[in-house]
Image (spheres, grey):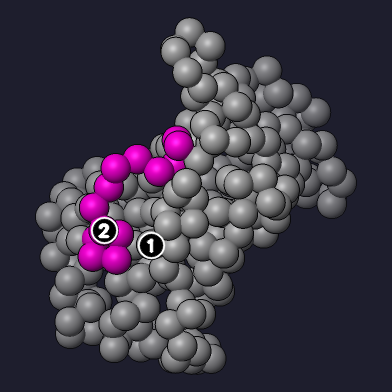
Amino acid sequence: MQSLRSATNPPAPDNNNVSLRQAITEVDAPKHETTAQEIEAAWNDFIKTGNISPVFDDPSIVGTAYDIKRYTPELMTAFSQIVKLMPQVIKGQQKPAVLIDALNLIYRRNIDKVVGQKDESGKIIAKAQLVHIDLLADIDPNIAGDQPGIVLAVEVFYEDGTSGGVRPITKNRSAAKDDNPMIIPLQSAMGDLSGQLALAQKLMHSDHYQSLFPQQAPQPASNTSQPQVQPINAAIGA
């Protein structure tokens, strides 16, 4: 467990003051023709003025971690759960399964990449749900010291509603059972989540956030209910 804590607590600047540029760097999502500078400028413009830039209509941005319209109140609740539960999982106080519901929302775009594919059964996959998380103590015995990692497994369902069973998320995110399982270094996973948390926090602190979802219930005013980045690192630390 000490190795898991160490892997998730690398030297880092104060996350309470994390910049948009830092957060964007951490998040693993496609940018294509849209540059990081354009994304940063669009985010800053919305946070200050409430203006929604055409950048957010770019097909390479829509639905990714850089899309401000992705950060629904429901997703914000999922981030709050990660903030609360991730430190407990890393310390062994909770089973990884407690993260499943939140991660199903946060990584829905990635999980859905198998939807529409035909697998070995000849059936079309209509739905996929994250159902299992494994924490591995050492994913690369060729490197000195423990290299912790995560393996995620999804259950797929066909158009007729039947289950195609549970299978790991693969490197190619395919439906093929013989594709190599994706083993995610724990430090990389934490970096990605921290980047998304930082972006969520920036939105939550903007006076214009509620204008994105005017038909949904307003968020609680208390800061304890809002997603924060710092508590993860503080709680995981020795």
Residue furthest front in the image: 238
The image shows residue 50 at horizontal and vertical percentages of 23, 84
Q: Is residue 131 visible?
A: yes
Q: Of the residues shown, which amino acid type is indicated by label 1?
A: Gln
Q: Residue at x 14, y 58 (%)?
A: 38
Q: Residue at x 31, y 80 (%)?
A: 205
Q: Of the residues shown, which amino acid type is indicated by label 2?
A: Asp
Q: Which residues are magenta?
A: 6-18
The image shows residue 224 at horizontal and vertical percentages of 48, 80
Q: Quadrant of the N terminus?
A: top right
Magenta-drawn stretch contains 107 = no
Q: Secondary structure at mark 2?
A: loop
Q: Relative to 179, say whether 5 is above or below.
A: below
In this image, 200 relative to 152: left or right? left
Few, some or many C-alpha atoms within 10 Å of disc 2 (few <14, some 14-19, many ≥20)?
A: few
Q: Is residue 54 visible?
A: no
Residue 230, numbered circle? 1
Tell which circle, 1 or 2, labels the residue nearer the N-terminal end: 2
In this image, 44 relative to 161: left or right? left
Q: Relative to 213, say whether 120 is above or below.
A: above
Magenta-drawn stretch contains 9 = yes
According to the picture, the residue beneath numbered tag 2 turns out to be: 14
Residue 40, numbered circle? none
Q: Residue at x 53, y 11 (%)?
A: 141
Q: Are marks 1 and 2 in contact (CB under 8 Å)?
A: yes
Numbered-mark total: 2
Q: Which residue is at the front of the view, 223 or 69?
A: 223
Few, some or many C-alpha atoms within 10 Å of disc 1 (few <14, some 14-19, many ≥20)?
A: some
Give the alpha-carbon distance from disc 1 to disc 2, as whole Å: 8 Å
